[in-house]
Amino acid sequence: MKFLKNNKGSYLYINKKRIVETIKTVVLFSFAVGLYLIGYITLKTNKSLWTIFAVLSVLPAAKSAVSMIMFFRFSSISDDEYSLIESCRGKVLTNYEYVFTTSEKSYYVKAVSCIDSTVILLFNKDKLNASNELKDHINMAIEREGYKGYSIKIFTDIKDYTNRLKEMNDKLSEDSNYSAERIFALFNAITL
């Protein structure tokens, strides 16, 4: 089970969460079917409390199924991308695989790095036109928390992202990680 344990923002989060949500969905639906069958086999009727319990147990199963479907829409970053980012980041705090959701869309961010008031994100190349919407969404979330003066830069090319990451590592000070921890705590709260 240690294989399936992971934290939001860690490498392979999406792939592991997909497995966990699938197992949870199967177990919850099996539980609902089991409750119904217990009532039907023992009482020979659908009109019992067992049926009501079975119907009510479908609600968490359906919620789990929606979560599973959301995680199947995305996949973890490749090993090559992860290795490249890790080799360039130095001591800059970096988190991986965030799924930001708005009322209209979901946005998958491969990596996020932060020092002081600078946040950089690695976004999908094919979603370039959506990057401004994501930037606005993140800015609103940061301002809602009362954090001021943050600069958000979204990269779609991993080379540009790693070059900026190296520059950030050169500017790193001892107080920089405190700001990053606040931002990552916020991102953990507003993402899947």
Image (cartoon, rainbow, N blue to C red):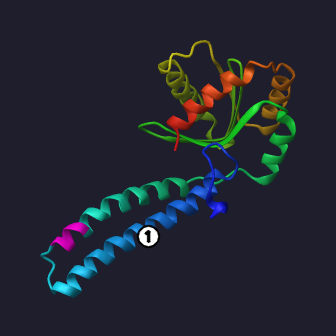
Residue occupying the point 21% across, 80% down: 39
**Does dot 1 land on a helix, a strand or a loop?**
helix
Residue 44, image x and y in percent? 16, 87
Determine the residue located farthest toward the top in the rendered image: 149
SS assignment for the magenta stretch, majority: helix
Relative to 27, does residue 167 appear above or below in the rendering? Answer: above
Q: Determine whether, in the image, residue 94 is placed left or right of residue 97.
A: right
Q: Determine whether, in the image, residue 10 is placed left or right of residue 46.
A: right
Residue 167, image x and y in percent? 85, 24
Q: Determine whether, in the image, residue 162 is placed left or right of residue 28.
A: right
Residue 29, image x and y in percent? 38, 70
Residue occupying the point 79% across, 53% down: 79
Considering depth in this image, is 176 or 68 the residue closer to the camera? 176
Task: Give the magenta range.
Answer: 49-53
Residue 111, image x and y in percent? 70, 39
User: In the rendered picture of this protein, how many numbered marks are placed on residues?
Assistant: 1
The residue carrying mark 1 is 27
* Rendered-image quadrant of the N terminus: bottom right
Q: Determine whether, in the image, residue 110 is placed left or right of residue 163.
A: left
- Please, what is the three-letter code of the amino acid marked with disc 1? Val
The image quadrant that residue 72 belongs to is: bottom right
Residue occupying the point 41% across, 37% down: 103
Badge 1, how many Cα within 10 Å: few under 14, some, many 20+?
Answer: few
Considering depth in this image, is 28 or 129 the residue closer to the camera? 28
Considering depth in this image, is 31 or 97 the residue closer to the camera? 31
Residue 103: within the magenta? no
